[in-house]
Image (tube, grey):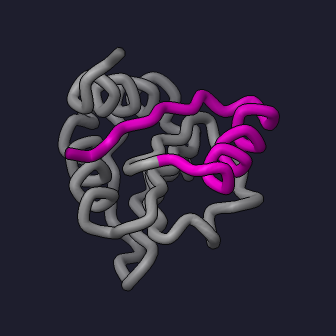
């Protein structure tokens, strides 16, 4: 099992290698989701993320090539979005498993972290 830092490094590397990709970080509560979002954002080297949205349940940073790093808590607004990778932060249940399976079926790489 990967630790949180290696997952964040992997997501940052994805954005560096393909600055046009979209990465979603989702979870039930915003505090752990924001922590993972900031970890990935600070690890990105070449993609040059600039913040565009920061409100109650949604954070977004965009690259010059229109790639995105987005965070959602709760996960409702993230459903139906296209992503290259998804990181779920927190405990899982049947509903979250169903949402993560739909991301997997659309071709996204799905990671899970407890966010502790």
What residue sits 62% from the left and 35% below the top?
A: 84
**Foreground residue, 82 or 16?**
82
What residue sits 21% from the left and 35% below the top?
A: 43
**Foreground residue, 78 or 114?**
114
Of all residues shown, which one is farthest toward the front?
Answer: 93
The answer to whether 75 appears left or right of 53 in the picture is right
Q: Position of residue 11 (x, y in %)?
A: 40, 31
Residue 102 forms part of the magenta stretch: yes
Of all residues shown, which one is farthest toward the bottom?
Answer: 56
Q: Is residue 64 visible?
A: no
Q: Position of residue 2 (x, y in %)?
A: 32, 18
Q: Is residue 43 visible?
A: yes
**Foreground residue, 46 or 7?**
7
The answer to whether 65 appears left or right of 10 in the picture is right
Check the image and report above or below for 49 versus 57. Answer: above
Q: Which residues are magenta?
A: 92-116
Check the image and report above or below for 79 versus 74. Answer: above
Say which quadrant the C terminus sits in. top left
Q: Quadrant of residue 83?
A: top right
Check the image and report above or below for 38 versus 105. Answer: below
The answer to whether 76 appears left or right of 115 in the picture is right
Say which quadrant the N terminus sits in. top left
Q: Position of residue 97 (x, y in %)?
A: 65, 44
What residue sits 31% from the left and 52% below the top?
A: 37
Q: Quadrant of residue 108?
A: top right
**Foreground residue, 37 or 105?**
105
What residue sits 72% from the left and 33% below the top?
A: 104
């Amino acid at each position: 099992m990967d630790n949180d830092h290696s997952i964040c490094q992997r997501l940052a590397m994805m954005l560096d290698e393909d600055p046009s990709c979209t990465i979603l970080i989702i979870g039930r509560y915003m505090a752990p989701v924001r922590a993972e979002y900031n970890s990935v954002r600070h690890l990105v080297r070449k993609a040059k993320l600039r913040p565009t949205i920061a409100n109650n349940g949604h954070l977004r940073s965009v690259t010059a090539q229109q790639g995105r790093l987005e965070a959602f808590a709760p996960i409702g607004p993230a459903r139906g979005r296209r992503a290259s990778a998804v990181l779920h932060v927190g405990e899982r249940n049947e509903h979250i498993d169903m949402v993560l399976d739909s991301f997997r079926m659309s071709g996204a790489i799905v990671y899970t972290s407890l966010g502790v």
